[in-house]
Image (spheres, rainbow, N blue to C red):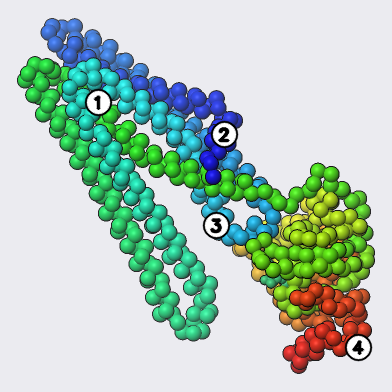
Amino acid sequence: MRFPVKRFFSYYKPYLKIFLTILACAFVVSSVTLVFPLLVRYITKDVLVGDLSRALSDVYWIGGLMLVLVVIQNVGNYIVDYKGHEIGARMESDLRSELFDHIQKLPFSFYDKNKTGQLMSRITNDLLLLSELYHHGPEDYVKYLVRFIGAFVILFFINAPLTIIAFCFLPILGVFSLYFNKIENRALRKIKERIGDVNAQVEDSLSGIRVVKSFANEHVEVEKFNRENDRFLDSRRKFYKIEATFYNGIQTIIQLITITVIIFGSASIVNKTLDLADLITFLLYINFMIEPIQKLTHMSTQFQEGITGFQRFMEIMNMKPAIESNPNAVTLQKVHGEIEFNQVSFRYDDHLDNVLKHLSIQIQPGEYVALVGPSGAGKTTLCSLIPRFYDVTDGDVLLDGINVRDMDLMSLRKSIGIVQQDVFLFTGTVMENIRYGNPAASEEEIIAAAKHANAHDFIMNLPQGYYSEIGQRGVKLSGGQKQRLSIARVFLKNPPVLILDEATSALDNESESVVKQSLESLARGRTTIVIAHRLSTIRNAERIIVLTEDGVVEQGTHDSLLARSGPYARLYSKQFEIQV
Ligand code: ADP
Ligand code: MG
C-alpha cells in the first residue's frame, strides 16, 4: 500500500493554529538554550578579565538576562509539553472515533474474519503510537535540528579544527544508536508478545479450571504455565542485556568525545590557538551536538511504528461497508411482512461451496413458518439474508414485494426482530437493556413489554427491580430469564417480521415452557420464521419447511409431512428415539 500522505496530514487540520504555535515555541526554546553557553563565554572572556572594578555590574546584568531567558525557556517548554501532548491525544482520539464508527458499519463478513481481541488492540495500541508521532515528530525535529545546527555553527566560528575533530565522532554515535535502537525495539516487542502468551495461558487454564480439576491435571497446567513464564523471563533478560550495552556504549562514546576535546583543546591552548574561555564554551556545547544524534535515531523507530500504526488504521478504513443503503432506497411506511426468496444462492466470502443453492420460498404476511433440518443445512444463513446481514450471491430476497437491496437499510432492519439462542445483554440496568429495543420508549412501555414477555415478575424480585445492574458485576440471571429480557426487547421494537433462531435450545425444560409462552405471544400478528430442533416447538406451525443440503426437500403441516414418511418423518422419529 502506498503511504497515504495527504490523509495522514489531514488530521492536523483542526489544530493547525495551535500546532504552528507549538512549533514556534519549540524553535524559540531551542534558540534560547543556545544562548546560555555564549553568555558564560562572555563572562569568562570579556567580563572577568583586566580591570575587575566594573565587572560586578556586568555580571548582575547578565544574571538578569539569564533569568529572563529561563522564564522564556520554561514557559515555552510548558506550552510544548502540555499543548503538544494534548493535540497528539486529540488527533488520536479523532482517529479512534473515526475507526470505531467505521468498524460499526462493516459487514458481518468482516467480523467473521477478525477476532475481537485483535480489533481491540487496533483501536487502542496502534493509535497510541500514532499520537506520539503526530506531535513529537515535528516538535522534536525542530528542537533538535535548531540545537544541532546552532551549536555546530557557533563552535565552528570559535574554533574550526576542534569542531571538526569532535564532529568526526558523531557518525559513530549515530550508527551505534541506530543499530541498538533497532535491536532494543525488537527485544521490547518480544517481551510484549511473551507477556501476551503468559496472559493467554493463565486465561486458558483458569477458564477451564473445572476441566483441569476433573482430570486432576493441575501439574500439566503448571508445567505449561512455567514454560511460558520462562520464555517471558528469557526475553526480559535479553532486553536488559541490550539496554545495558546500549546505554554504557553511548556513555563511552560521549566520554571519548569529551576527553578528545579536553586534550586537543588544552594542546591548542598551549599552542595559543585557543583560550580557556573557549574551551569551557566547547565543553558546554558538546552535549548540544550529541543529544540530537541520540534523539533523532530514537525518533526513527518512533517514526516507523507510527507509520505502521497509521497503515494498519488505513487498512480498516479502506474496507468498504459492503452492505449499504443505495441512494434511491425505499423507506416502507408500513411493512406487512410478506417474504419471498427467489432462486437464492449464497456462499460465504472465502468458501468455495454454496451454502444455499437456487432456493425459492414464499411466506405470507402473518404466517407462522417453521424451518427444520440437520445442523449446518443453512437455516441460520437463510434467515440472515432477510435483514441483509449478508447479501445474496445470486437471486433476490423480497420483503413486501420489494428487493431488500432497494430498501433503506435502517428501516429494513427496524422491521425485523430476531431472538437467538445466545442472548447478549449489555452492561447496564434491566431497564436500559429492554429499552435497547426502542430508545424512545417510556418506562410504562418498557414495563408493558416485560409483562408481555413474562419477565415482569422476576424483574420485580431483583434487588433493585428494573434498575438492577446486569452484565459483568450485576445480578446473575438464568438462561431463561436472559432470554425473556431479550424477548421483551423485541416486544418493544414491535417488528412485523420475527425470526426465532433456536431461541429455546439452550434452556432446560422448565424455563423452555415459560419462554415458549412468551415467544408465542410475541409471534402473534407477525410473520414468524421459527428455527428449532425440538420438534415440540414447531408442531403447531402453519407450515413446516424442511431444509437440507439439497435445498427445500419438503413442506407442509406436521400431520401431512408425517403421513408422507419422508425426511421430516425420519427427523421426527430420530428425535423421538433420543428423547425416550
Ligand atoms: P444451520 O443454522 O442450519 O445449522 P448455518 O446456516 O449456521 O446452518 O451454516 C450453514 C453452513 O455455513 C455451515 O456449513 C457452516 O459451517 C457455514 N457457516 C455458517 N456461518 C458461517 C460464517 N460466518 N462464515 C463461513 N461459513 C459459515
Ligand atoms: Mg443455526
* Relative to 63, residue 378 above or below: below
Q: Residue 403: image x %, image y %?
A: 86, 55
N-terminal label among 2 and 3: 2
Q: Is mark 1 within 8 Å of ligand 1?
A: no
Q: Is mark 3 within 8 Å of ligand 1?
A: no
Q: CA distance from mark 2 to mark 1?
A: 39 Å
Provide the residue designation for mark 4.
563
SS label for mark 1: helix
N-terminal label among 2 and 1: 2
What kind of residue is marked 4? Ala
* Relative to 351, residue 154 above or below: above
Provide the residue designation for mark 3.
118
Which-is-in-front pick, marks 2 and 1? 2
Which-is-in-front pick, marks 2 and 3? 2
State the residue at coordinates (11%, 29%): 263
Q: CA distance from mark 4 to mark 1?
A: 100 Å
Which-is-in-front pick, marks 4 and 1? 4
Q: Nearer the viewer, residue 297 or 203?
A: 297
SS label for mark 3: helix
Quarter of the image where the N terminus is located: top right
* Relative to 531, residue 414 above or below: above
Q: Residues within 10 Å of mark 2 (few under 14, many from 20)?
A: few
Q: Residue 445: image x %, image y %?
A: 85, 57
Provide the residue designation for mark 2.
6
Q: Residues within 10 Å of mark 4 (few under 14, many from 20)?
A: few
Provide the residue designation for mark 1.
285
SS label for mark 2: helix
Residue 344 quadrant: bottom right
Q: CA distance from mark 2 to mark 4?
A: 70 Å
N-terminal label among 2 and 4: 2
What kind of residue is marked 3? Gln
Quarter of the image where the C terminus is located: bottom right
